Image (tube, rainbow, N blue to C red):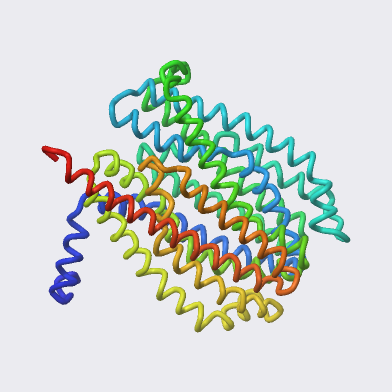
Amino acid sequence: MVDRLPTPLRQAAQRLVANPLLQRVVRNTGYLFSAKTSSAALSFFQSILAARLIGVVQLGLLGAITQFAGLINRLTSFRMGDLVMSYVGEYSASDQDEHAAAVFRTAGLAEVATSFLAYALVLLLAPLAERILTPGHDMHGLFALYGLTVLANLMAESSNGLLQIFDRYRLIAAITIAQSLVTLALIVAAFVTGGGLRAVVLAYLAGKVVWAVAISGAALWEARRQWGPGWWRARYSLIAPRRREMVRFALSTNITATLTLVTRDSEMLWLNALASPLQAGYYKVALAFMNILLIPVDPLISTTYREVAREVGARRWENVRYLLRSGSLLSAIWTFPASLGLVILGPWIIDHTYGATFGPAYASLMVLIIGVAVVNVFYWNRNVLLPMGMPEYPTKVYLVGAVLRIGGILWLVPIYGAIGMAALLSAFFVGTAGTLVAKTLREIRRAEAELALVPGD
């Protein structure tokens, strides 16, 4: 097939295939891509069943229930997966296994502590959430019930990072698909038996628990396989000299994640509080289609980061540029045709899947596509700056974006509902991604110029 391409395209394709950096990215992305797309398809189908089972308004309430637990979890999370990938990867590359084990143990214990804190906050705040987010609807403790996902997570982020470091992408893929199958099976059962909102919440809860427990168990087994049965006794003193650096890293990623949560991953809460569950239901459908665009690209983030971190550490800037260009090209090959398909076929798809009552979701979807296309193509916009020693810069960018977006939410969402929320998210995507891409390219040019001045390099 490659031989039939025009000469320039054939040569470019051959270079892509021959480069070992991209080979690893593509292979590992392939595992996660298969899992994410399979999971996305299953999730899309289950969202259709859930929507038809409980209707627009209760779909909006479901979004508030699930995002509330996610908000609490993310507020107390320090993105230990990123920390594990950065520091366990560094120590493993230099054969300092005991140091690597100490990092994983410390990250895991910290995550366990924050998980218990998060669940305590869920229980404390659940009654308030019911009054503010779902007034007039009897939730029967559903906020606290779904909050059990926070407790089940325990050390899931650290575990996911460890499995990626040791190239266990196939296992991660299998667990991801298993989670979706469990959730789908339970929603099908609820659909057949005529279950209500509680049955759907229990289905989502079961899937999340399956994923978290399986990922954590697999990581503990992998740690034993890599470092021996006594890995958990690794001395903290080995990594104590870098404590300040690791704390700085964890705090920066936590703040960035929190800002992302407030501006991007809490829309259902804002819509329920400032507009109505009806508008939240429309927006949830638009998000389901948005995820069709995002999920196939999402695996590229972690697999590219793994390779970019190594090349940045070795100061191989030409390879870094190559990875970023190639990754953006791979993303664009999917993003632009898929976006065009949704623009043309969106109304028909919504009508024949969710039903005619969900038709107003199309307008929000069209607005979202603009921002999603940008953030998809430049999916690496934040991660390259982390191994370059600038974890605070994305935090500052997201902070400015968060302040502007929250002001916009308070102004536009009560008036325009789901469409206003979609416009603000697209603007946030375009603004933050554009700023971070420009900064990344400037820093790469600066590093290349400095390297050129070093004798012998």
Query: Which sits in the foreground, 153 or 374?
Result: 374
Vertical arrangement, residue 156 with respect to residue 403, above or below: above
| Residue 16 location (% of width, % of height) | 21, 60
Residue at 61% in and 57% down: 263
Q: Which residue is outermost to the left?
A: 456
| Residue 320 location (% of width, % of height) | 27, 51
Residue 115, quarter of picture = top right
Residue at 47% in and 16% down: 233
Vertical arrangement, residue 286 with respect to residue 209, above or below: below
| Residue 46 location (% of width, % of height) | 61, 63
- Count of numbered circles on the image: 0
Asked whether, in this view, residue 62 is left or right of residue 242, the answer is right
Quarter of the image with the N terminus is bottom left
Residue 129 visible from this viewpoint? yes
Quarter of the image with the C terminus is top left
Query: Which sits in the foreground, 330 or 43?
Result: 330
Residue 285, quarter of picture = bottom right
Vertical arrangement, residue 154 with respect to residue 352, above or below: above
Asked whether, in this view, residue 13 is left or right of residue 142, the answer is left
| Residue 172 location (% of width, % of height) | 45, 45
Residue 214 visible from this viewpoint? no
Query: Which sits in the foreground, 125 or 220?
Result: 125
Residue at 37% in and 47% down: 305
